[in-house]
Amino acid sequence: MKRLVASSMVALATLSHALVRFQCSQLVIERLDPLVNPGMVPSAHVHQIVGGNSFNATMDPAKDMPGESTCTTCSFAEDFSNYWTAVLFFKARNGTYKRVPQSSQIQGAKGGITVYYMQDALYDQQQKSKVTAFKPGFRMFTGNVAARTKAEMAQFRQLTYTCMDNQGTREPETLDFPTRPCRAGIMVNARFPTCWDGVNLDSPDHMAHMSYPGSGTFESGGPCPASHPIRMPQVLFEVVWDTRQFNNKADWPADGSQPFVWSFGDGTGYGNHADYVFGWKDDALQRLMDAACVVNCPTAHAKTQGTAAMNQCAKQKTVTEDIDGWLTSLPGM
C-alpha cells in the first residue's frame, strides 16, 4: 500500500494550495460515544477525544458547538469539532491490561491526534481540486467495530497501522496490528470518505451519506459517484500510540503473538474505526480550503493558538472508573 503521508514538514511546505495539518491535544479519555451510543453513560468502550470542550454524551445535531465551547484542544482556535477513536491497551502475558499512552507529533502538545484536511492526495503538490467544507450538524463514522478478519474490513482499506522504527517512519502500512515490537510506537491512520450525497448531514449508520470514489481512489483522483456527487475534504487522523514501554517480548503472550488490543476487545486490529463531528466556527474551514496555503494557513487569516492553550483546554470526566492502572478486564467488557 502506497504511503499517503509526506515524510516531513519540508515536503509539505512546497505545496501551493490548501492542505491543513495540525495537532489537537487530549480533551478527555473515557467511556462516552455520542455518535454511536448517544445518551449512553457510560458507553460500551473507552475512547480518546480531542477538540472543543462542549463534547458530551448526547451531541444533538442542532448543537452549536462553537457557541457552546469555551475552548478547543486544537491549534486552530476556530475548530471546535470533536475527533475520537477507541483506546489501545497492552495485554500482558498474565492476562492484565494497561492503557497505552499517546505521543504527540508536535513538540509540547499533550497526546491527542494529528489532523489533516486536504483537497487531493497528500503527496500531490498541486492540491488543486475544489472541495466543499462540511456543514453545521455534519458527522460521520468510518470502520467496522465487529470486523475480525481481513475480508470483513476490506471496504475500510483506508484504516491502517504503521510500525514506527523512528519518528519519520511512514511505511509499510498494514490493515492489522504489527507483529513485532515497534521501536518508536504504532501509528494508526484513519482516512474518511470524501464524497457527500449533498443532502444528509448524517445517516442511521453515520456512513451512508458519505462514499469513497466510485472508481479509483481519493489518492488517484477517482470521481465521486452520482449518488454522492459533492467532493469534500479528506479528513485524516494520525494517532501515535507510544508502545515503547511494552516492547519486552518476555511480557508478550507465550505463543509470541502480538499483545495489543483495542478497548472494545479486538486483538486483530481489523475493528479499527474513527468518529468525526464537525464544529468549525462560521466559514473558517471553507476559507482554509479556498486559500493557497499549508499548515497554519496565514493567508486565510486563520486564528491559531499555542500548545499551552491547547493543553489547558480539558474536560472533566463524566464516567469515574480506573482506566490507567493494571486492569483485570477492559472497562465495559
Image (cartoon, rainbow, N blue to C red):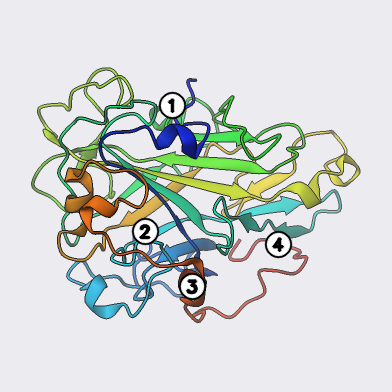
Rounded to the nearest whole Å, what is the CA distance between mark 4 and mark 1? 29 Å
Q: Amino acid at mark 1?
A: Ala
Q: In this view of the protein, can residue 203 be seen by the observer?
A: no
Q: Circle 4 sits on which residue? A: 329
Q: Is residue 235 above or below residue 229?
A: below
Q: Mark 3 touching mark 4, by CB under 8 A?
A: no
Rounded to the nearest whole Å, what is the CA distance between mark 3 and mark 2? 12 Å
Q: Is residue 133 above or below residue 313?
A: above
Q: Residue at x 21, y 45 (%)?
A: 289
Mark 2 element type: loop
Q: Earlier in the sequence, mark 3 or mark 4?
A: 3
Mark 1 element type: helix
Q: Circle 2 sits on which residue? A: 36
**Quadrant of residue 167 within the rendered picture:** top right
Q: Nearest the camera: 254 or 18?
A: 18
Q: Circle 3 sits on which residue? A: 42
Residue 1, image x, y percentages? 49, 20
Residue 126, image x, y percentages? 27, 27
Rounded to the nearest whole Å, what is the CA distance between mark 1 and mark 3? 30 Å
Mark 3 element type: loop
Q: Is residue 218 above or below residue 210?
A: above
Rounded to the nearest whole Å, what is the CA distance between mark 1 and mark 2? 21 Å
Would residue 238 appear left or right of 40 to someone viewing this image? right
Q: Circle 1 sits on which residue? A: 154
Mark 4 element type: loop
Q: Mark 2 touching mark 4, by CB under 8 A?
A: no
Q: Nearest the camera: 13 or 316?
A: 13
Residue 252, image x, y percentages? 83, 43
Label 3, residues with CA under 10 Å away: few <14, some 14-19, many ≥20? some
Q: Earlier in the sequence, mark 4 or mark 1?
A: 1
